[in-house]
Amino acid sequence: MDWSKKLFFTAFLIVAAAIDGAHGDAMVTGTVFCDQCKDGQISLFDYPSYGVKVTMACPGSDGQFTTWGEETTNWVGNYAMRFEGTPNLSGCYTQVSGNGQGSNGCGAVAGPPKYVRLMFDMFDTEMYTVDPLLAQPAEPCPFARKVLPPTRLPLPILH
């Protein structure tokens, strides 16, 4: 090896040793819908809700859930939480926790929590997704059909 190649190789080793390696991050994303009919599912009259606070909680070593992050939805009802490194987010859930300047009073009642699901894991980067969360107004909209409890039909008598 001539001296220029040795110098280049030495410089390369110094730079490689100085770089502190690539660190991945974890991201959790989801959407919040305003459940105007208060039927517990996304229907024709429901719309993405902006300005709603979403909280993510994860189980601690003692079994108690602790808050890991809180984010507010944007104009199209989406939220994204970013965490440095690649923490274990299995067992974590997200839930509507309040209504900031939100969508016209939607968010007075929070829907059920949803657990995070791993969608992508590559090169120390993890991407989690959450099924759509529901925020509900205090009263259902007047044009929503009423949800009645299922009725039991009598069993036919066989002779």
Image: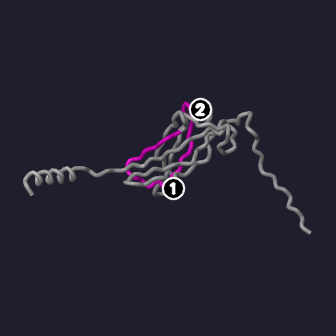
Does the segment drawn in magenta span residue 84? yes
Q: Residue 80: image x %, image y %?
A: 47, 42
Which residue sits at x=40%, y=51%?
125
In this view, the residue farthest toward the left is 3
Residue 156 included in the magenta stretch of the image: no
Q: Nearer the viewer, residue 32 or 57?
A: 32
**Is tag 1's residue or tag 2's residue first in the polypeptide sequence?**
1
Give coordinates of residue 41: x percent, y percent.
66, 45
Report the side of 16 relative to 28 (left or right): left
Question: What residue does disc 1 label?
Answer: 91
Amino acid type at circle 1 is Gly
Distance from label 1 to label 2 (Cα)?
A: 29 Å
User: Callout 2, which amino acid?
Assistant: Ser
Image position of 64 with respect to 43: above or below:
below
Where residue 126 sits: x, y (%)? 43, 52
Q: Residue at x 92, y 69 (%)?
A: 159
Q: Which residues are magenta?
A: 78-102
Q: Is residue 99 shown left or right of residue 38?
A: left
Which label is found at residue 103? 2
Kindly state the secondary structure of the residue where label 2 is placed: loop
Residue 82 found in image quarter: top left
Disc 2 residue crowd, few under 14, some 14–19, many 20+, Cα 10 Å:
many
